[in-house]
Amino acid sequence: MKRNVLEWLETTAAGFPDKVVFSDQNRSITAAFVQDCARAIGSSIAEKGICRKPVAVISGRHVLTPVTYLGVVYSGCFYAPIDSSLPVARINLILDTLQPALILTDRTNAELLSQLAYEGETMIAEEAMEHPVHMEQLETIRRFAVETDPLYVIFTSGSTGRPKGVITSHQSLMCYIEAYTRVMEITAEDVLGNQSPLDYIAAIRDIYLPLYRGCSMVVIPKEYFMTPAVLFDYMNAHHVTAVGWSVSALTVPASLGAFAHGRPEYLQKVCFSGSVMPGKCLRIWQEALPKARFVNQYGPTEATASCTYYVVEEQVTDETVLPIGIPYENYRVFLLKGDNTPARPGEEGEICVTGPILALGYYHDPERTAASFVQNPLNDCYRELMYRTGDIGVLREDGILEFHGRMDRQIKHLGHRVELDEVERAAGLTEGVAECCVIYRKEKEQIILFYTGEASKKQIAVDMRRILPGFMIPRKIVQLEALPKLANGKTDMKTLQEIDI
């Protein structure tokens, strides 16, 4: 049993040093190159006396980014991936919570550092890759490592307006990757097509499967997803055989009639997650790839990406609503009713998760950690933490779990987790907005902002883009004379949902 992800890399590099593990539009790099460069970065960080501390990695979507992550791990630290395209204000919020010992960035984003409210140590990744490797120091660091050490901190939307940093350990990540590999039947011959940003939870599959299984990963340019013919040509040129994409990434080609002009010829394994898959979309993919394996996956970042899966063996119809399936190995998933008693088959309950795959908590946030990671109320004999997902589920008689929506105002939108309250707070910062309320229309995957006041829709959108990432910006902004209210003075959400815009 491995206890550190670097053991995966070293096994692959020793057995297949010339195997290409990561590729993008500009270059391909081998397992030996990844190992050598990561060790150099690790030596460079360790030389500064930094160990067991968070390191922020601000980088782009290219092959050197996962190398940089692994370099941080070699140093005995843990990394916090930050997409360089995020608004500066949001990056500053993340850094304020993280308080990193170091910011590591690539040359392309070096100028961004001057715009940040950060005055600590910085390092350029490409320069660190040329640093001499000090194996004795790296071996000493590894000797004192344990499998529950933090591996990374991924920041997600937070209802208070401050992003939450979910801390995941080596053990949790390794449990998930090993289970996912078995379900998706990933082999050393597979080529993974990366769709998600490398700072997003879904990207961990594309980063760590090549290290564990010896397969390859190719970064697919974001803009290709809007031109399916170009997307499919790129996938075919790289012989992409397996993907783990958000539902939204699969719906675009299907909605644009892409399969009338071609298809991904080598694609055999398709995993999707992030939101509910429309039956119409999956039917189109099944008809285009009749021999492919399709798997629906569900789960939060707090449970290391996903906790349940459902292998789609039936031919779906436009009306099909897929279940979310059964737990992965090393995950215990169950339903609790409002009185903390177990929900029986057919009854609704909150989806709860326990097991070694649980996150270590939220970084620098003990209050929210204590509120979300709680003692399993069904066990009063020993400590057993569980995570309350806030999602509603129903267990069928055959043991298959169904998803029945959210309990609160947290949604999954375009594959990302979004707190509607955070979007609302951002809108309220614009001068001239008197009141505002944000709703989500699930059937159309639309975030909609209703507001009162003299501010223009354009100004609100411009101001929000300075604070929030693009996927959190409302699709529609609607000005009203007054927000509808309930008798208790609260905004009438039901009426807003029914307004024809």
Image (cartoon, helix red, strand yellow):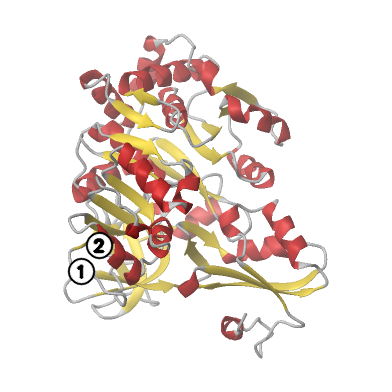
Residue 81, compared with residue 74, is above or below; it is: below
Q: Which mark is first along the chain, 1 or 2? A: 2
| Residue 353, quarter of the rendered image | bottom left
| Residue 488, quarter of the rendered image | bottom right
Q: Horizontal and vertical percent for residue 128?
A: 52, 17
Q: Residue at x 60, y 83 (%)?
A: 500
Q: Residue at x 59, y 24 (%)?
A: 107
Q: Which quarter of the figure is the C terminus placed in?
A: bottom right
In terms of depth relative to the viewer, which is nearer, 278 or 229? 229
Dot 1: within a 10 Å radius of its alpha carbon, few (fewer than 14), some, or many (20 or more) residues? few
Write down the residue under mark 2: 286
Write down the residue under mark 1: 315
Secondary structure state at the residue bearing disc 1? loop
Q: Horizontal and vertical percent for residue 484?
A: 68, 85
Identity, as a three-letter code, of the amino acid under mark 1: Gln
Tag 2 near tag 1, CB within 8 Å: yes
Residue occupying the far bottom of the picture: 487
Q: Which quarter of the figure is the N terminus placed in?
A: top left
Identity, as a three-letter code, of the amino acid under mark 2: Gln
The CA span between labels 2 and 1 is 7 Å
Q: Horizontal and vertical percent for residue 434?
A: 79, 72
